[in-house]
Amino acid sequence: MPEDKVISESETPKIESILDLVSEAEDGVNSRISFEEFTDERLLISYDASGNKQMKIKVLEVSDENPPSKWKFGDRVKISKILITIKHLANQEIEEGEFDIEEIEREMAEKRHYTSTNRWIPANDIKNGYVIGSMHTRLISDASALDYIVF
């Protein structure tokens, strides 16, 4: 006959309650974000004219230059480098490219004697490191004119 095994207290498995686990998780990481921090992904995306491509622009580098008149135009930052991600909706292909807007602006002025880029973007139009969709054409206008990007 099998013998009855006596389990001592040190051998008993620890059972943690779900509430203990949840409270430990909340202590380490704040899992909730405030309404002001929330950014809808659709706000960051722009579409081409035919609706076949999506574009998203991430800010890589910002100039430390001070805005000319903060009182008139608000708090703005001058963008130097961006990362453009284009997604082709038909085949889900993704293209990425890094652009030095400052260099492209100089090249445009040299080759065409004109530049249209306004690299000053309101600070409120940059969400989680990405530029909102309504500012995309402002940042890529010279790159488009020089055929660096076709969108």
Image (cartoon, rainbow, N blue to C red):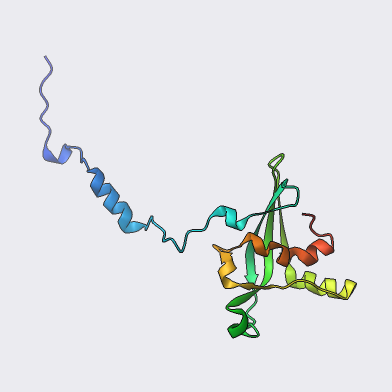
Q: Residue at x 38, y 55 (%)?
A: 31
The residue closer to the viewer here, 80 or 144, is 144
* Image coordinates for residue 16, horizontal then vertical, percent: 22, 43
Is 81 drawn above or below residue 4 in the view shown? below
Residue 40 is left or right of residue 83, and the answer is: left
The residue closer to the viewer here, 40 or 86, is 40
Q: Residue at x 30, y 58 (%)?
A: 27
In the image as oriented, which residue stretches furthest toward the top?
A: 1
| Quadrant of residue 70 within the rendered picture | bottom right
Q: Which part of the image, by quadrant, shows the N terminus?
A: top left
* Image coordinates for residue 48, horizontal then vertical, percent: 73, 52
Is 6 drawn above or below residue 139 in the view shown? above
| Quadrant of residue 131 within the rendered picture | bottom right
Q: Residue at x 75, y 71 (%)?
A: 117
| Quadrant of residue 133 within the rendered picture | bottom right
Residue 27 is left or right of residue 64, and the answer is: left
The residue closer to the viewer here, 50 or 113, is 50
Number of numbered discs overlaid on the protein picture: 0
Residue 50 is left or right of residue 40, and the answer is: right
* Image coordinates for residue 19, horizontal then vertical, percent: 24, 47
Q: Residue at x 60, y 57 (%)?
A: 44
Q: Which part of the image, by quadrant, shows the C terminus?
A: bottom right
The residue closer to the viewer here, 10 or 86, is 86
Residue 15 is left or right of residue 6, and the answer is: right
* Image coordinates for residue 53, horizontal then vertical, percent: 71, 48
